[in-house]
Amino acid sequence: MTLPASQAENEPIFAKARAAIAKKLRNLQFAQFQNLERLTTPNVKGIPTDVICGKIKILSSSGGNVSLRPFVYFVGDETAYYDSGMPDADLDALIVKNFCAD
């Protein structure tokens, strides 16, 4: 299977994004990445920022619940954040919301 040029060009950075998010997840039982997209979006200072936005399907550590959670990966400094869905004002969720549309 041949990937479209833009997809093929981005695959190495998508692999880095997947690895960075997987590293953040505790008790990773199952993770499936979806809707990866490379964007340039302004940060809070208006400076263009290269990011990967996407969603990850996560199986809970108990094996019962599967949820689809959004994430952002910053290409420049290789940091990653994902919205865990926890109700306690998750800072990661705010960062994801500021850089990636839902």
Image: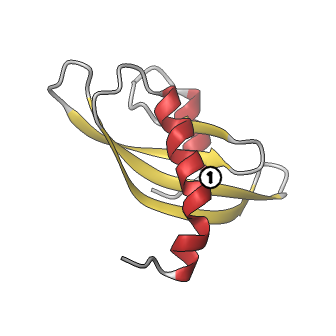
Could you tell me if residue 7 is visible in this image? yes
Farthest left residue in view = 64
Q: Nearer the viewer, residue 75 or 39?
A: 75
Farthest front residue in view = 1
Q: Position of residue 56 (x, y in %)?
A: 38, 45
Q: Nearer the viewer, residue 57 or 30?
A: 30
Above or below, comparing residue 95 to residue 100 in the picture: above
Q: Position of residue 65 (x, y in %)?
A: 18, 30
- From the viewer's perspective, is 83 left or right of 63? right
Question: Dot 1 surroundings within 10 Å: few (below 14), some, or many (20 or more)?
Answer: many
Q: Nearer the viewer, residue 1 or 24?
A: 1
Could you tell me if residue 97 is visible in this image? no
Above or below, comparing residue 16 to residue 20 in the picture: below
Q: Position of residue 22 (x, y in %)?
A: 47, 34
Above or below, comparing residue 45 to residue 88 in the picture: below
Q: Secondary structure at mark 1?
A: helix
Above or below, comparing residue 47 to residue 17 in the picture: below
Quarter that holds the C terminus: bottom left
Q: Residue at x 70, y 51 (%)?
A: 75
Q: Position of residue 46 (x, y in %)?
A: 83, 57
Q: Residue at x 35, y 26 (%)?
A: 28
Q: Residue at x 62, y 52 (%)?
A: 99
Q: Residue at x 56, y 32 (%)?
A: 92
Q: Report the residue marked by disc 1.
A: 99
